[in-house]
Image (cartoon, rainbow, N blue to C red):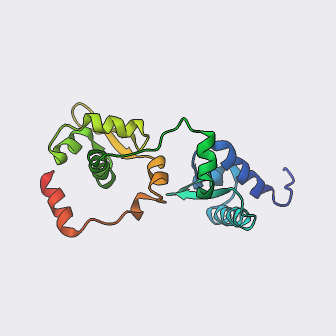
């Protein structure tokens, strides 16, 4: 059995989050670190606290039940100068409308989005996929096996959300209207 150094789990967790570049699930961290959920969560809290105390340029963000190492928003301008090739996302009203349907109905098919909007939405959905705000979530078990759409981790980051459950709930009459439309 390997002898563990003091703080080894914390350093390993930091290395996992840094090397991944993508959100890492709590389950994956538990598996790699060979720790239970509470132990991993304590390490995440400890690592977050270290970054805050140091006033570090990086932070740990929670995205649903996954975690990712990110830069602090304060440093956006400096990073923007470094990576000027990336354009800011500016969504049109049509794109926002389509995105909101996907957000509240996910997983949803292109046809369902078009039916709710009353117009073909393929081009708008394609643009949202290009912006990496929407992605394929699998296929529906129905004739033709249509593609299901859902929001991405980038959507959560762009809108400053930890989870889609943080979105405001639709008023009851809006939910009823949506049910009737479908």
Q: Nearer the viewer, residue 101 or 182?
A: 101
> Is residue 155 shown above or below 174?
above
Q: Residue furthest left?
A: 180
Q: Relative to the observer, which residue lies in front, 20 or 59?
A: 59
Q: What residue is drawn where x is 17% and y is 57%?
A: 179
Residue at 66% across, 49% down: 17
Give the percent coordinates (x, y) of residue 40.
Answer: 66, 61
Residue drawn at the location 30% of the way across and 55% of the way down: 104
Is 113 placed left or right of 1 in the picture?
A: left
Which residue is at the front of the view, 40 or 135? Answer: 135
Residue farthest top in this picture: 144
Residue 146 can be seen, yes or no: no
Q: Position of residue 66 (x, y in %)?
A: 55, 54
For the question of whether residue 173 can be seen, the reply is yes
- Which x, y percent locates residue 83? 59, 39
- Horizontally, residue 64 falls left or right of residue 102, namely right
């Amino acid at each position: 059995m390997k002898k563990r150094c003091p703080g080894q789990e914390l350093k390993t967790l930091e290395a996992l989050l840094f090397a991944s570049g993508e959100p890492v699930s709590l389950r994956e961290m538990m598996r790699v670190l060979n720790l239970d959920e509470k132990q991993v969560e304590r390490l995440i809290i400890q690592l977050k606290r270290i970054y805050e105390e140091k006033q570090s340029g990086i932070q740990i963000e929670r995205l649903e039940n996954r975690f990712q190492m990110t830069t602090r928003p304060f440093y956006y301008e400096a990073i923007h100068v470094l990576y000027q090739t990336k354009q800011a996302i500016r969504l049109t009203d049509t794109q926002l409308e389509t995105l909101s349907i996907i957000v509240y109905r996910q997983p949803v098919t292109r046809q369902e989005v078009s039916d709710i909007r009353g117009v073909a939405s393929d081009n708008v959905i394609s643009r949202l996929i290009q912006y990496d705000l929407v992605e394929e979530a699998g296929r529906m078990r129905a004739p033709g096996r249509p593609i299901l759409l859902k929001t991405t981790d980038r959507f959560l980051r762009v809108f400053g959300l930890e989870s889609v459950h943080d979105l405001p709930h639709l008023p009851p009459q809006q939910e009823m209207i949506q049910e009737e439309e479908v």
